[in-house]
Image (tube, rainbow, N blue to C red):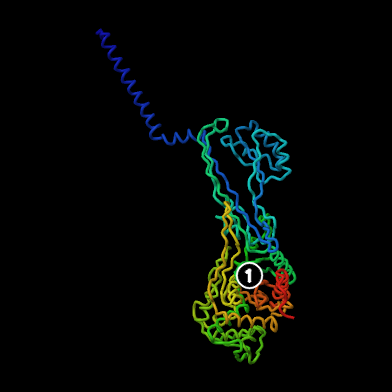
Amino acid sequence: MIRVPKKDIFRQRTVEVTVFLLFAFAIVAAKLYVLQVVHGPQARLAAENQHSIYQKIFPSRGEIFLTDRDTDELLPVAVNIKKYLVYAVPPEIKDATGTAEKLEPILGMAATDILPKLLQADRKYVPIKKQLTEEEQQRLKGSELAGIYLDSEDSRFYPQQNLLSQVVGFYGYKGNAKAGLYGLERYFEKDLAGQAGELHEEKDTNGAWIFGSDRRITPAQDGTNLILTVDKNIQFKAESVLKDTVAKHGADSGSVIVVDPKTGAVLAMANYPDFNPNEYNKTEDPKVFMNDATMGNYEPGSVFKPLTMAAAIDEGKVTPDTTYEDTGTVVIDNYPIKNSDLKAHGTQTMTQVLELSLNTGAIFAKDQIGNAEFFKYVKKFGFGKETGIELPEMVGNLDNLKADIKVNYATASFGQGISVTPIQMIQAFTALANEGKMMRPFIVKAEVSANGKTKLTEPKVVEQVVSAKTANMVTAMLVNVVENGHGKKAGVPGYYIAGKTGTAQVPKKDGRGYEPNNNIGSFIGYGPVENPRFLMLVRINHPRDVTFAESTAAPAFGELAQFILNYYHIPPTRK
């Protein structure tokens, strides 16, 4: 047997060990490279997250207020209040089943619903129940359960309940997040919400801040407060009168808008039925959330006739004393159009056209300027587009006037075949009450930021739609409507009021004709005519007991007008 020298054996083993060590070192080096270079950022972040805390700082939502003319005090209609919630820190809970069973009678929740929340051992904050009652809070405070804590959060509260409900809207859940829904809460969501801040700090294993470690705070910016132009006393009265009128006539619903015609500031905006935004989830029909004053498209009917007359007068084609022969019917392309009373009245002036609300007379006035010029004035009066009020709004529908179909223009002259919104009608009539200047309606008097900076809303003239002379002529004609025509029940003793009734048919849903025994009664007017302090529209939808607006909307207008004149301490101007 050949013996290998011991020296060679030692050399061979040394080589083997060296190769093994080099190979092992290479593996370790490779792993260190992957860990430190390839996955280094992630590893550092993971290590940092074990003792770094990032916490969102929530801002307070902006609040909404009404004004009081007499005291200048603000009446809150949307505010924030503290609501308590209970949450768990699962790592601190040793007996999850026992804790769930003890919480069951305290919170009024099934232990089977609570237990899964307590078993989330990898989380340090698990909400169990929000908006605790006072009784639940007290019971929980006395329980002293390990790992169960009370906390508070801002909750939206509407102290005036149903008052101005569709205008204010509400703050609720949109998917999994909360946001403003409907009304001002929706329109001003970004401003009301503010901006969240952030807290970043280092904590030890016990959750305490490490003294001297990095701590960064980005402060939250609280939301903007809104101060409305709405006067609380006029609003209260408007809602009361509207509710009584809808009930009296068995109507489906109704709306009231009151503005200052010289500025466009909204003094009241009411809808009925209304709802309590604190309990919006109990409302059976979500349609009640809609603000019909700005979103309710409808065919206005005869309240549109003064605008047709204003256009014809402004173009110099008619005067209040211009006459025509009323035969009771106008036939256009084999389509007969009749007066609402189905009568022929013989020779009538343009003033009498408004007094008696003659459809044939509105067609006559429109024909004097032609379809193209008439359409131009319809658009000048603001129809077919948004008014710009700080609320969600519809724009109506003027599609029937986009093609030169004679019968469509004829019916549009007395407010049928086109659709508008109440706020558009109000904006248009500011021109008649304000010497031809049409004012943009607005409902926010001021926006007050968290740092106290105030942004006031300035009145805006949209356009000089007609001349001051034309506006004053039409105003005088509308006084005659209240004095001698269908608007008598809208009058107020001791004052001259200008206004017009309108009883409009309601189109069928399929667009073919109109619904039988269904109408919308409205009255729009302003006063005192020497110096108009208010412009108001009252709309009553589908009254069951009477047909014409002179018996529904007009009396409601008169009652509210009387209140406003007394409230403003305006002395009578006539005997």
Q: Position of residue 121 (x, y in %)?
A: 58, 34
Query: Between residues 441 and 301, which one lies in front from this camera angle?
Result: 441
Determine which residue is flagged by label 1.
260
Vertical placement of 553 versus 392: above or below? below
Picture quadrant of residue 526: bottom right
Quarter of the figure that contains the N terminus: top left
Res. 536 in view: no
Residue in view at x 65 percent, y 83 percent: 340
Picture quadrant of residue 563: bottom right
Vertical placement of 307 versus 60: above or below? below
Vertical placement of 344 versus 412: above or below? below
Query: Between residues 378 and 536, which one lies in front from this camera angle?
Result: 536
Q: Position of residue 56 (x, y in %)?
A: 55, 43
Q: Amino acid at mark 1?
A: Asp
Q: Position of residue 512 (x, y in %)?
A: 58, 76
Picture quadrant of residue 286: bottom right
Residue at the limit of the structure toward the left, as seen here: 2
Q: Position of residue 118 (x, y in %)?
A: 62, 37
Q: Secondary structure at mark 1?
A: loop
Quarter of the figure that contains the C terminus: bottom right
Res. 214 in view: yes
Total label count? Answer: 1
Q: Residues within 10 Å of mark 1 (few under 14, many from 20)?
A: many
Residue in view at x 69 percent, y 42 percent: 109
